[in-house]
Structure formats: structure tokens, C-alpha cells
Image: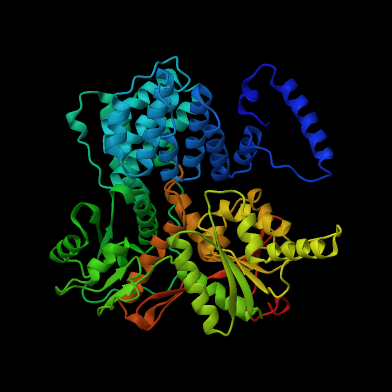
Amino acid sequence: MLFPWLRRCPAGPLIAAVLVVMTLTVTGCLGGRSVQFPPSLDHADSLARQGDQAGAARVYEQLALQNSGAHRAELVFDAARAYLAARLTDDAARVLTLLEEPITPEQNQQRALLQAQVDLARGQSEHAWQLLSTLSVARTSPEFASFLQLKQRAAFASGRLVEAVRVEDQLEACCLPNAQAIRQSREQLLASLRDASERGVRADPRANGDAVVRGWLELGPLAAAAARNPAAAAGDVAAWLARNPNHPAGATVRSQLLQRRAPAAPVEGPPLRIEGGGMSIALLLPEGQQAALSSSVRAGFMTAYYQTPPAQRPRVRIYDTNEQGAANAINRAIQEGANFIVGPLMREEVSAAADLTVRRPPILALNFLPAQHATPADFYQFALSPEDEARSAARRILEDGHRQGVALTPAGDWGTRVLSAFKQEIEAGGGTVFATATLDTADTDYSDPITEVLRISESRARHKRLEQILGTKLQFEPRRRSDIEFLFTPAQQASTERLLRPQLRFHYAGGVPTYATSDAFEPDTRANQDLEGLIFPDMPWMLGSELAEAVRNAAKDAWPSGGPRRTKLFAFGFDAYRLALALRSGPAAVQLDGLTGRLTLDSEHRVHRDLNWAQLHNGEIRLLPPAGVSASAQ
């Protein structure tokens, strides 16, 4: 559809049909040449349905800039929602500034709801709560249910457990259509209260006179205890049920906290030896804006902890580096008896930890020091580094027998760092990157950088010059350069790779072996159809292994209602715990088959991750043998 207002116009389909006929006629008059039409709502909606929320958002934004008034506002809101779905928070905030005043009260309400989502995504939970607390949304409004759910999220994020519970009453009274929806909402509330308790958020139930609210508040630490040890918590759960016979959470408590399977057996791993009179670990993670990252790391770390036999578990205490800074957190941990430190997480915090001159226990930092920074004694570094993956891709390309090729990388610091690491590694192995181009990921058409790096533009220029010399029209098919043995196309987001790969095929490069980093892949069979042939490394947690399956089953037993999101950072936290135990026996003990890869320690005390390799075929993952090993030898 060429004009966005047609979708909302009663006569839209008829007008659209006329326009389609007109455009077909124009195409015919132009001798079969394709015509580039303006972005359309149909295209944006199609991208959204295909899972490309970032691409849809960019089209909505373009359409908003072509419209004004109410149409512009609606398209701005569509773009902001899609950017948020794609986790492009800064873009969502930016597109909201495109609204033109004046706007209606209803539009102002939508803007406030979207701004609150932006605030929550940025970790600005206090601002989100204040914004939502002053917002008045009518019960009859179609946004009322979304408003309440968002308000509950903001309450939990800002530590307001009482308010979060009270919102549940409102949701059940007005917006949940049936018993199943109410049951699911209560299960989610219990899971959120448990998560808040695990994060150290406290609310005194005795201070609340409402018996229903008081009962819910008691359940947070109770659910956390039951997740750690269901048998030990069973008596407290039964006592809660006896005190609260008519509480709305009764059925949820029985199904979630009592009807549990027996705890899974510890995950197979190397023998764990605790030396020096017992191990006490300080886990340093930031809250605030990085709370979402920390939550996944912490969940993986504690999952590994509970998979350790109870007699061998070290003491673990968690410190918030956002509140007190990395240096102060380390000093406090030492004073409280820590003899091993895991963290901090952010790069600048890791540098601050390395600069400490106080006597301290060994540190396993969860990021790498800058290349120029000296590594202190007993200072180990573990990270999910895209530069390391780029170097791994370079080695794989060389081992696969390819020597010369080109690279297309995203514009910006991430792409610059990845490309530099890749070129350094491939040139050290005798290979060559003879052309590079950058991709503006805010765009959806990569034709210019592709034709530049493949020299298709030069082919077209030669064709035009030859026609001028001969004075006649020549039949012509553009050709890419023929000396390309590989393409390196890392992407910070899978949506970028899904746009790039089909365009490479269109420009005659679909048959060239194409390598990427793990960020270019997400496990979505339908969306990955566009990535046909892509070769990439990834951790066993994503591609599958016996350990990964065992951990997933264990986590399912511990959290039958879903539990924390089990992302790559979850795997990172799991392996950080196991590395800490191994390092207590000395650096030579670090040879682990982990969730994030096969882990070893180099001479600089950096943990090296040897990843698995895969190729996409018909949207499905096809595991590849190690480099230099034929498939028939497996």
C-alpha cells in the first residue's frame, strides 16, 4: 500500500486496487525497469509479522516523517513499539521526539505509556514509576490493562512490592477475562515476588494491615527458599496455607511450591575440591541500568551453585557495584571474609578492580581489561567477547582453505573492534581482506556498500563506457569480482544479518562461503530461512550439548513456573561459578566443557572459549565438524 492513510480509509481497498493497476502500467511503460515506491504500511506490517521488528520500525518512522497530525502520531507510536520490541531503546526514545504538538489527550497518554517502557528498558525504574503514578487511564480505555501491567512492572523494578500486589487486585477485577488468565497472572506475580526476594528487595509483611497483601508479601522469600530446597521449605509452605486458608494465592502456592519433582541430580562436571578451610565467594554485579544483565548472570551463577552437592557448596554473598562502586564492593567483601571474588561485570569496573593496590583474594573478572592494561597477579578474565569470536572466525576461514575475501561490518565502535580483530588474525595466518564496507543498520537497503565491496558498480561503469564507445545498446548482466573466496559479515543483531543475506544473493554473492559471529543468529526457524548457508560459531548452550540439556532440565525442576530467562548471559553466569571453583585449585585446573564453550586459560590469564560451528540450511541448524575434519570422519 503506497499511502498509510489507505489502511484506515473505508474506500482504501478500492483505491489501492486502482493504484496497483496504475503502477503496473507505469512499470510496463518503463520497459520492465523496476520502480522504487515509497515505504508502505503493508511492508512494515509484513516485516513485523516476519519477526523483523527493527526493519518494521524504520519503515514506520519513514512513514511518520511523510505524514502530519493524527496520522503522524499513530505511525510514531507504531515505530516506538517496534523499536522497543527489537530492544532498540534509544531509537524508541528518539522516535517519540518526532511527535508534533498539539496532540490529543489520548495521544499524550500513549506517549506517556511508551516513555515509561523506554525508562524501564533503560533501568530508570523510579522515573517510570513516577510517570505512571501520575497518569490517569480510564477503566473503559483499551489501554487500561496494558497500563496496569506496565505499572506492576515499574513497581517491581523500583522495589515497591506492596504497590505491585495491589495492582494485581485491579487487574483481576477489571481486565482478566477468565479463570485461566487469572491463574497465569497469579503465577507470574509469585514468580516476580520470588525474583525480588532473590535480588534482595525486602518488604515487611507485618507492616501491612491488608491480609491479602500481607500474604503475598510473605510468599516472596518463601518461594525463593522453596526454589533452593523444596523439601526443607515444605513445612513453611504448609504453615502459610494454614494461616491463609482463603487467600487468592492458595491454589498457586499448592501447584507451584508443593507439587514439585525431586531435585535433579548434580550436573556432571569435574571434581570440586574446596581448600583452605572453606570457600567464600563474593559475586559483584551492578543493579540500576544494568539490572537486566545482572539478573541473567546471577540466575546462571546460582543455578550452578544449587547443582553443587550441599556439602561442597561455598558461601556466596552478592554485592551491588552500582550502589557502592567496584573498589568499595571489593574492600567490603574482603572485610566480610571473601576469599574469592567473581566480577565485576562492566569494563570500566574491571579496570578499577585491576588498579586496586590492597591485598586481596583472587579475582575472576567478568569482562576483559583493555589491551594496554597490565594484568595483576591472581587476576583472571572471562568475557563473551565479539572480538574473540571474530578471531575464531578468521582461524576457521583459513582452516577451511580460504585465503582472500571481503568484509561488511556494522558502522560504529562494535563493528570497528570486530573488524580490527578479524583482520589482525587472518593476516597473521597468511590471508587477506582486500575490501571492506560498513553498513548503516538504521537503513534496510545495503545495495551501495554491497555493490562497492563486490565491485559490481565498477562492472556497470565499464558497461556504460563500452556502450558510449560503440554507440549502441549492449545486453548486459552485472558481475561481481571473481577473486572472492569468503565473506565476513558479523552483525550485532540477527535482524541485520537477515536483511543482508538475501541482498548478497541478489547481488550474485549467495554462493560465496559467508561467515559471521554468534550475534548474527537467533534460534527462530522461520526468521532464519533468510540466512541460508550462513556459517557461524556459537556456545553449546545455544547449539546443544549434554551439559546444556542437563542444566535446562535442572532449571525446569527448580522453576516450574518459568523462572529467569535462560539467555547467553545465563550460561555465562553458570560457567563463571564453575570457573571460580576450578581456579581455587590453580590455573592449570581450568579445562572445562562449559555452556559457553570449551574453556581454557591462556598465558595472560584470559579464559579462552572454543566454540562449536554450525551452518543454517532451510532455517535449521546443521552442526559442522571441527575445522580440518571431514564430515565422514565424524
Which x, y percent locates residue 550?
A: 51, 60
Up-down relation of residue 405 to residue 193 (above or below): below
> What percent of the width, then of the height, locates residue 94?
42, 40
**Residue 521 % position (x, y):** 57, 57
For the point 38% across and 34% down, the residue is 115
Scheme of colours in the image: rainbow
Give whichever of 631, 580 is nearer the camera: 631
Q: Can residue 223 be seen?
A: no
Displayed quadrant of residue 340:
bottom left
Residue 26 position (above or below residue 525): above
Residue at left 86%, top 57%?
473
Residue at 86% x, 59% y is 472
Q: Nearer the viewer, residue 273 or 585?
A: 585
Residue 456 visible from this viewpoint: yes
Q: Quadrant of the C terminus?
A: bottom right
Q: How many marks?
A: 0
Q: Is 156 or 474 nearer to us in this picture? A: 474
Residue 246 percent location from the top left of the image = 34, 23
Quarter containing the N terminus: top right
Q: Quadrant of residue 189?
A: top left
**Image side of residue 79 versus residue 282, left or right:** right
For this view, does 184 lie left or right of residue 352?
Answer: right
